[in-house]
Amino acid sequence: MKSSEDGAVGGAGGAGGVGGAGAAATLGIGGLAARFGLAPHVLRHWESVGLLRPVRDAGGRRRYGADDLARVATILILKEAGLGLSTIRSLSGTVDRAARREILRPAAEELRARIAAARASLGFIEGGLNCAHEDVTQCPNYRRLIAERVGERGRDDGPLRRHPLG
């Protein structure tokens, strides 16, 4: 059975959501989690690390409004971009442009590197898809890529560099 904390309350006629005709409506933790496809414990964790600050009703249950929905959407977008929760917390705690740039610059560099690695991986996969050789290991392009990877060993015979994707 669904707890009373899960649904939307308040607003004009208890309109089942946040915003719109029921602008004063709020969601319980289960309703907010379901809206974003998250487990409620994720929202509790984000609260514990300072990313969410839901209001509490008279019974002590968490209530989430329109600002909380925007905050969850922002957290999800930043996580998809590769930012960790501590970075997101730092970012949400500043309105200073210079501080924001200092926080985001390393994340942008890391994302560019991941994109470059993903493009290289896609090129390798597409090469395999388009290769006319029955045995792809006999393909000159495959052999060149493998030779390049083997050749990544440093002149000092140090360890091979780790591939960015794993």
Image (spheres, grey):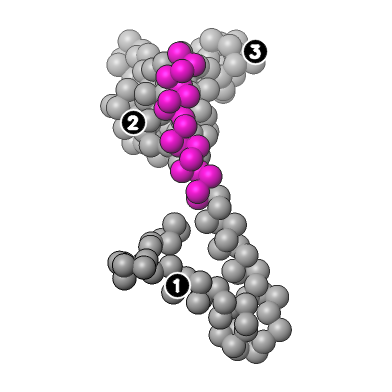
Q: Earlier in the sequence, mark 3 or mark 1?
A: 3
For residue 21, the mark is 3
Q: Percent from the top left, x then y, of residue 19? A: 60, 16
Residue drawn at the location 46% of the way across and 22% of the way down = 100
Residue drawn at the location 59% of the way across and 13% of the way down = 22
Mark pair 2, 1: CA separation? 38 Å
For label 1, count other residues whose C-alpha is less than 10 Å away and answer few (under 14), some (14-19) or many (20+): few
| Mark 2, secondary structure of its residue | helix
Please give the residue where the numbered disc 2 appears in the rendered image.
86
Residue 162 showing in the rendered view: yes
- Magenta-colored segment: predominant secondary structure: helix
For residue 151, the mark is 1
Residue drawn at the location 70% of the way across and 75% of the way down = 130
Residue 23 picture quarter: top right
* Magenta stretch bounds: 96-114
Q: Amino acid at mark 1?
A: Gly
Left or right: where 165 falls relative to 134: left
Q: Percent from the top left, x then y, of residue 67? A: 50, 16
Relative vertical location of residue 8 with respect to residue 108 in this rendering, above or below: above
Left or right: where 69 falls relative to 128: left
Mark pair 3, 1: CA separation? 64 Å
Residue drawn at the location 31% of the way across and 15% of the way down = 59
Q: Amino acid at mark 2?
A: Ser
Seen from this angle, which residue lies furthest front? 155
Q: Amino acid at mark 3?
A: Ala
Q: Percent from the top left, x then y, of residue 124? A: 59, 69
| Mark 3, secondary structure of its residue | loop
Residue 140 picture quarter: bottom right
